[in-house]
Amino acid sequence: MEKKPEVYLFGQILGTHSFLLRDGFLQPDEYAEIGEKYFLPGGETGTAATVLDSLGVPVRMDGTWIGTEVAPMLKAFYENKQVDLSRLRFMEDDPGIMDYVVIAGLVRSPMGRFQTLFASGKRWWSIPSEEDIEGVRVAAIDPFFGEETLAAARICRKLSIPYVTIDSRHDSELHIGAEVNVVSKECTSEHYSDKTPEEIMKLMQAETDGLTIITQGAGDMLYARRGEEIHRMKPFPVEVRSTLGAGDTFKAGCVYGLLHGMNDEELVRFASACSAVAISRFPLPLNPPKLPEVQVLLGQTAL
């Protein structure tokens, strides 16, 4: 019997073409051998859905409209998983949103047509409704879809459903209302290049009662709430096979932590362990973190 969704996810759902190179990253005018290649669900929301299902959490996801090339793969992939696709819009006249990612260990380069799509002025994602969100315990909302993103956040606040978001600026409505905002190194480099991580955290803390987490790749994570001292945590050391999906897995780990009532330190450690497991294998959608292996990693390092 299909379980009722506990989590609502809204955001990017893609078909990702991934290429793992055999002998290092691309070099100009040099041949590169493809070791492995796949076409699998991706995007911040698609990856989070895959990870949460693997952790035993039933989810409902919505966001990007799904086209004719992506739909068969997506439906087949989630057929026997606890991922409700009933809110997705499946298009009949467009191949759908896809990206292409070249990967070699710690380095990856995504390619796509997102700038063109956003510049078109056309909406290619769903409008969230209260009916879609009502009854779940936690939500996760990607910051990419303008008024529809804010609509999802406002519905969550109305229904008193905590939500996790990513890469939302300190002065954004999404950050202010979030229970958790995970801010990546890419985000801080783009929006706060003249500030230290500690200065960024202070800006974040001042605007919300929620938890802000600043990730820095292999560097220390910072996390804090309003009025607190800034806490630090080292990532779990693992052998990296691919970093594709690491941040999306971290987000999923935060959702799991909220669902299970973890305190801030427990939540950050759990999310970090999920991400560490994720980067140790490829491709992530076929090898998502499972709860027992996350727990093993958590047990290797004392609090």
Image (cartoon, rainbow, N blue to C red):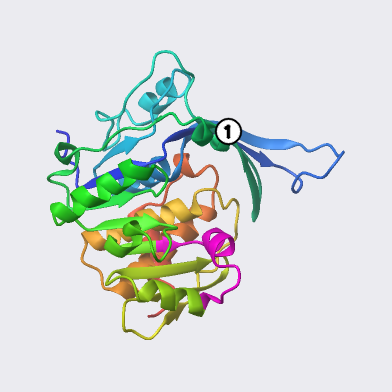
Q: Is residue 66 above or below residue 157?
A: above
Q: Secondary structure at mark 1?
A: loop
Q: Residue furthest top?
A: 93
Report if residue 189 lies within the magenta region.
Answer: yes
Residue found at the far front of this picture: 121
Amino acid type at image mark 1: Arg
Q: Would you call the spot at circle 1 few (<14 residues within 10 Å), some (14-19), or many (20 or more)?
A: few
**Eyeballing the image, is 26 above or below 34?**
below
Q: Is residue 17 visible?
A: no
Quadrant of the image containing the C terminus: bottom left
Q: Where residue 180 appears, x then y in whole percent?
A: 32, 63
Q: Position of residue 5 (x, y in %)?
A: 19, 42
Q: Quadrant of residue 269?
A: bottom left
Left or right, 36 with reference to 45: right
The residue at 31%/64% (across/down) is 176
Which segment is the magenta one? 182-197
Q: Examine the image and state in which quarter residue 60 appears.
A: top left
Q: How many marks?
A: 1
Q: Position of residue 262 (x, y in %)?
A: 25, 69
The one nearer the camera, 270 or 161, is: 161
Residue at point 36%, 25% (across, down): 75
Q: Nearer the viewer, residue 183 or 149?
A: 149
Please state if 162 lies on the left or on the right of 43 as rendered. left
Residue 95 is situated, as x and y percent measured from the top left of the image, at 49, 19
Q: Quadrant of the N terminus?
A: top left
> In the displayed structure, would residue 21 be above or below residue 185?
above
Q: Nearer the viewer, residue 146 or 22?
A: 146
Occupied quadrant, residue 74 = top left
Q: Which residue is mark 1?
A: 113
Seen as rendered, the residue at the extreme right is 29
In front: 294, or 103? 103
